[in-house]
Image (spheres, rainbow, N blue to C red):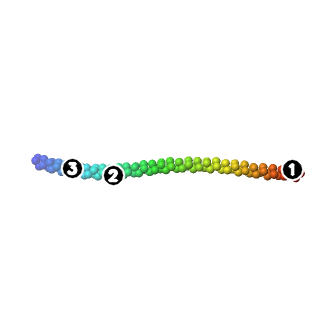
């Protein structure tokens, strides 16, 4: 019986040692995995900051592009107005020239008669 209890104690000690080694290795794995998870989380956070910065830059560029489009449209409208004024003045000048030619021809025939 004494030898059974010694064997039992030896087996128990071996089982405890085995469990302690298993717990230690599991603890080591957990620590390693935690460090890896933290590293990946830091990388993800950095990537999120980069994406946020890039999206802000894109928004700024879109706003700038909209402003430039509005300025271009305003310039086109002003140029269109100026063309209308120029064409109106040109048509008035041509009408005056045509009227002068008509009156010259009309009065020159009357004077010869």
Measured Cα–Cα span from mark 3 to mark 1: 132 Å
- Residue 88 located left or right of residue 99: left
* Residue 39, disc: 2
Measured Cα–Cα span from mark 2 to mark 1: 105 Å
Is residue 28 something that shows in the picture?
A: yes
Q: Which of marks 2 and 1 is in front?
A: 1
* Residue 1, disc: none
- Residue drawn where x is 13% and y is 47% of the image: 5
Residue 39 locus on image (x, y percent):
33, 52
Label 1, on which residue?
A: 110
Nearer-N-terminus badge (3/2): 3
- Asked which secondary structure carries label 3, the reply is helix
Contact between marks 3 and 1 (CB within 8 A): the answer is: no
User: Seen from this angle, which residue lies furthest front?
Assistant: 111
- Residue drawn where x is 65% and y is 50% of the image: 83
- Asked which secondary structure carries label 1, the reply is helix
User: Seen from this angle, which residue lies furthest left?
Assistant: 2
Label 3, on which residue?
A: 20
């Amino acid at each position: 019986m004494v030898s059974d209890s010694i064997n039992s104690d030896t087996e128990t000690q071996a089982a405890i040692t085995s469990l302690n080694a298993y717990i230690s290795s599991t603890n080591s794995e957990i620590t390693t995995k935690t460090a890896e998870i933290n590293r990946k989380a830091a990388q993800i956070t950095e990537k999120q900051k980069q994406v946020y910065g890039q999206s802000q830059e894109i928004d700024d560029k879109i706003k700038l592009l909209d402003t430039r489009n509005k300025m271009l449209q305003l310039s086109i409208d002003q140029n269109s107005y100026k063309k209308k004024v120029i064409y109106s003045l040109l048509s008035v000048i041509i009408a005056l020239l045509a009227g002068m030619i008509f009156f010259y021809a009309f009065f020159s025939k009357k004077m010869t008669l």
